[in-house]
Amino acid sequence: MKKAFVLLAAALSAGVLAGCNSAPKDWKEEEKKLMTDNLGGNVLPYYYVEGYVVTDEYLEEYGCISVEALQGKKEDVLAYEKLLVAKEYTCDVKVGDDLDMPYFGSYYKTFADDFVLMVQVYVGKGTKETGKFVIDAYYYQEMQDYSEYDLDSWAKCAASTKSYFEAYNSVAPVLPEALETSATTFDMMDYRYMYYAYYGEDIGFPVGLLYLNGAKEAELDGVIAAFVAKGYVKKTTSEGAEYYEYGSSQFFTEFEYEPAEEGFPEAISILIY
């Protein structure tokens, strides 16, 4: 009888301890809904760090759903990386590969219509072994680069610009049919894509950066005049910077002469957004 009592007590004790230390096995239903509503119907692999919260606090500014815990460690980052690999996410940045952020990892899945679910996991802002633990998840459509370089005429550059804006279902800017310039080649740079590639953030609307390669500084006023003749109106910001507006804020345009440097010819640049 005494032996049975001891065994029963031990079993109860083990059960109580297990109950105190057991972590949840899955996200709460409201957490799953927050993910599915904002991540293309997807739910992130579950991982428990004490005190975590799932939040859309950064959704409007950065476009992500986040899981945050005040205190985590590099082992948590490595464990979550292992979960992502097991769920067949593709590696973008393996934990430890970025020398500036050795406690940061980035993985993704690609879906139909070029939509991507990007998951970034890090601790201590990616630079420290311990600290705030974060999982950031972004669901977005992969951006294409519509840039075209070394076009041999302004007409081709204008046509490229028109096609670029229309690719995003935007009204194309009204451009002069001809420009008086000594430029030998023309570039239509997809500034939206360039910004995304450099900063990892989408500015949300098409921006064309046109280069008149070889154009002289003395030609800048004539280029601007050609745009003014099409209805662009000179404006000044509160800080004193000049820009040109078309169609009641439909388009904004900035012009600049850029001297030759580091292998690039002198040019006149035209920023249209």
Image: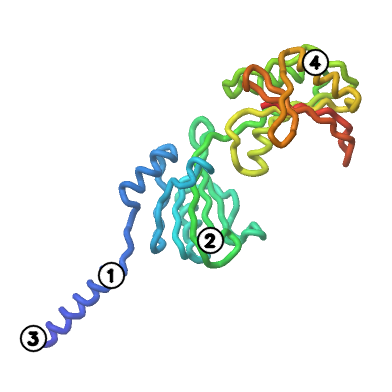
| Residue 169 screen position, x and y as percent | 57, 21
What label sits on residue 20 in the rendered view? Answer: 1
| Residue 136 screen position, x and y as percent | 50, 50
Determine if residue 139 is in view. yes
Q: How is the model colour-coded?
A: rainbow
Residue annotated with mark 2: 123
The quarter in which the N terminus is drawn is bottom left
Label 2: element kind: strand
**Is the residue 49 above or below the residue 176 in the image?**
below
**Is the residue 87 above or below the residue 52 in the image?**
above
Furthest-bottom residue in view?
Answer: 2
Instruction: State the residue at coordinates (73%, 13%).
Output: 230
N-terminal of the two: label 4 or label 1? 1
Residue annotated with mark 4: 226
Residue annotated with mark 3: 1
- Which residue type does callout 3 highlight? Met
N-terminal of the two: label 1 or label 3? 3
Crowding at label 1, few (<14), some or many (≥20) Cα neighbours within 10 Å? few
N-terminal of the two: label 2 or label 1? 1
Label 3, label 2: how far apart the Cα atoms are: 53 Å
Instruction: State the residue at coordinates (69%, 30%).
Output: 190
Label 3: element kind: loop
| Residue 42 screen position, x and y as percent | 41, 42
N-terminal of the two: label 4 or label 2? 2
Instruction: State the residue at coordinates (72%, 18%).
Output: 232
- Residue 250 vs residue 270: left or right? left
N-terminal of the two: label 3 or label 4? 3
Q: How many marks?
A: 4
Determine if residue 109 is in view. no
